[in-house]
Amino acid sequence: MTNLPEVDWAVSDTPVSYAAALALMEARARAIREGEARELVWFLEHPPLYTAGTSAKPADLKDPARFPVFDAGRGGQYTYHGPGQRVAYLMLDVGARGRDVRAFVANLEAWIIAALAAFNVEAGVREGRVGVWVDRTQPGGPLREDKIAAIGVRLKRWVSLHGISLNVEPDLEHFTGITPCGIADERYGVTSLTGLGRIVTMDEADMALRDAFEAVFASRLVRVAAPELAPPSAVPTRA
């Protein structure tokens, strides 16, 4: 893999505020566009919070006082982030990677699916439902499918921001404060690796994500120090 393009890979070991993450992503994406920095894949966890994408509907925020709520600026609707969930933010030069938005999103999906396969989890995408899903239908029972990973991205002058979130061992009850991704159908829920009976550490999840990223994106991740973050504002961007 020595001839593959290198991408910086950072892991933050303590929870990162959403405001600080947004500021870092914007600054790094700008530097990438200007040729002053390499691409970055950033693994982190957030404290409990809800984020609203550009298509978020007010009715889908069912418990607005529960956790801070932030306008994300990405596509999509409401989602939850919190401890036990691996968030991976990608600042990638999609312009230099073919300028194909559909292919980029398909690679994000393939990345998650390949990482989950390392834990013998069969997952896939569903027409009309964003993210990565697992079939929980019992023999002879009604359809039941649960989302295990969310995808939400934004492109700014062909450099990506935001990325994916994989449920390793979050508190799934925290998702009840929103209608996740606007899907209210009771046949579709949310799960995690722990919910599927896979006891996986965050480090193990990281290694699976690293290996799958290198295979899907044909790039070599080079570990770098976690980003230095400016003191964040704790004020949510929504009341």
Image: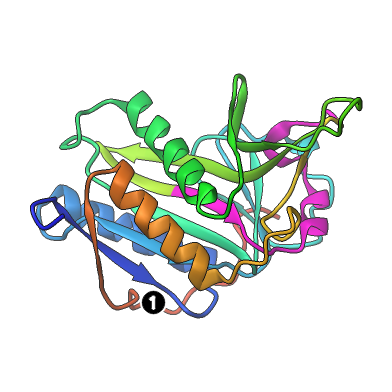
Which residue is outermost to the right?
141
The picture places residue 154, in percent across and down from the top left corner, at: 40, 39
Q: Position of residue 122 (x, y in %)?
A: 60, 40
Question: Closest to the observer: 234 or 37?
Answer: 37
Q: Can you give x and y, in whole percent of width and height, for residue 158 in the image?
A: 25, 36
Residue type indicated by callout 1: Ala
Provide the secondary structure element on which disc 1 rests.
Answer: loop
Total number of numbered discs in the rendering: 1
| Residue 7, quarter of picture | bottom left
Nearer to us in this view, 195 or 224: 195
Q: Which residues are magenta?
A: 163-185
Q: Position of residue 8 (x, y in %)?
A: 24, 63
Decide whether residue 8 is among the magenta residues: no
Residue at screen point 16% across, 54% down: 1
Can residue 172 be found in the magenta stretch?
A: yes
Left or right, 37 with respect to 126, comes to left
Q: Is residue 176 left or right of residue 166?
A: right
Residue highlighted by disc 1: 230
Quick one: which residue is furthest to the top in this view? 127
Q: Residues within 10 Å of mark 1 (few under 14, many from 20)?
A: few
| Relative to 78, residue 182 above or below | above
Q: Residue at x 49, y 45 (%)?
A: 112
Q: Residue at x 59, y 46 (%)?
A: 149
In the picture, residue 61 is in which quadrant?
Answer: top right
Residue 78 in view (yes/no): yes
Q: Residue at 35%, 64% (x, y): give it.
A: 24
Establish if 220 lies above or below 124. Answer: below
